[in-house]
Image: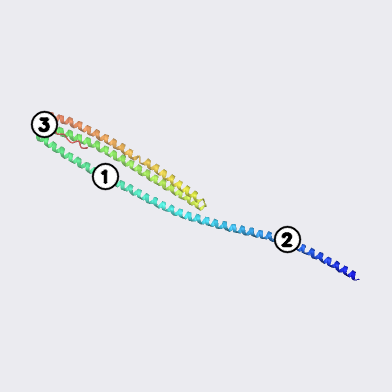
Amino acid sequence: MKIACKQYLLGGFSLLSIGVLVLPVSALAMTVEEREAQRAQRTENRQEKMTEMQAKRDERMAERKENRQEAFCSRFVESARKISATMAERRSQFDERKGNHADILETKRNEREAKFEENRSQADERRNAMYEKLSGRAKTDEQKEAVEDFQKAVEAAVDTRRDVVDAAIVEFRKGVDAAVAGRKDDMQDAVATFKSAVEVTFDKAQKACESGTDQATIRADFKSGLEAARTALQSDRKESEKVGAQVKGLAETRRTAVKQALADFKATVATARLELKNAFGETGETETPTATP
């Protein structure tokens, strides 16, 4: 009986030992799965956090980029306004210079005209004094008639010469006025074209800013647009500066006409003087009217 009881107890203990040995293995197997699950969960959580952090960084970077773009565009617009103000000021100065130039041109013309008339008046006085002197020398009717004929011939020559000279001056001034007016119109068109080109460049740059175009590209395009506008303006200015050559040509035409008028006048006076000398029976030099235009 004791032996049987002992065997039973030993058998019980064996089963209990097996149960104890089996239980930790089962519990250990579940712990590994849980740990794997926890590890996977932690990995997923870290990935979510990393994704969230990256999204926040991207958002902050985008915000900073947007702020930089806004700041750049703000500075750009301010700079554009200054350039526009400078252009407006230069346009005003250009118009003022044109007005001043026209006033100066008119003043100089009036001064030359006054001096011209003064010289002619003095020449008239000298001729009248010469006629009186010749009349005083005339003793015979033939000599007196010769003096009258000489005076008529000289005065007619003076009138012809002055008509030619006055016509040449009028044509010269008309040509100069037309050339200057053409240059004025050309420069106004050139300035208007330049202003329009700059405004177009501004608009493109501002639209590029609003669309988020790269700042370097905006600057480069803006600079390129301004340079193109300046180059076109300089080219137009060079074309308008050809007025100098036109004025030189007009001056040469006037000079030729005046020179020919003086030559014709001298020839007429020389013939009249010769007839006068014959009437007085002289072979020496006699007084000759001054060839004042």
Which comes before the other along the chain, label 2 or label 3? 2
Residue that protrudes farthest toward the left in the picture: 139
Residue bearing mark 1? 108
Q: Is residue 11 above or below residue 216?
A: below
Q: How many marks?
A: 3
Q: Residue at x 79, y 65 (%)?
A: 20
Q: Residues within 10 Å of mark 1 (few under 14, many from 20)?
A: few
| C-alpha gap between disc 2 and disc 1 | 110 Å
Q: Position of residue 116 (x, y in %)?
A: 22, 41
The three-letter amino acid code for the residue at tag 1 is Lys
Q: Position of residue 39 (x, y in %)?
A: 68, 60
> Element at badge 1?
helix
Which comes before the other along the chain, label 2 or label 1? 2
Observer-nearest of 78 and 259: 78
Q: Is residue 252 above or below residue 194?
A: above
Left or right placement of residue 28 versus residue 199 in this view: right
Residue that protrudes farthest toward the front in the picture: 3
Q: Residue at x 31, y 46 (%)?
A: 101
Left or right placement of residue 278 versus residue 244 in this view: left
Which comes before the other along the chain, label 3 or label 1? 1
Q: Quadrant of the C terminus?
A: top left
- Picture quarter containing residue 153? top left
Observer-nearest of 134 and 188: 188
Q: Give the label on residue 194, or none.
A: none
Residue bearing mark 3? 143
> Element at badge 2?
helix
Residue bearing mark 2? 32
Frontmost of labels 3 and 1 is: 1
- Picture quarter containing residue 230? top left
Observer-nearest of 182 and 60: 60
The three-letter amino acid code for the residue at tag 3 is Gln
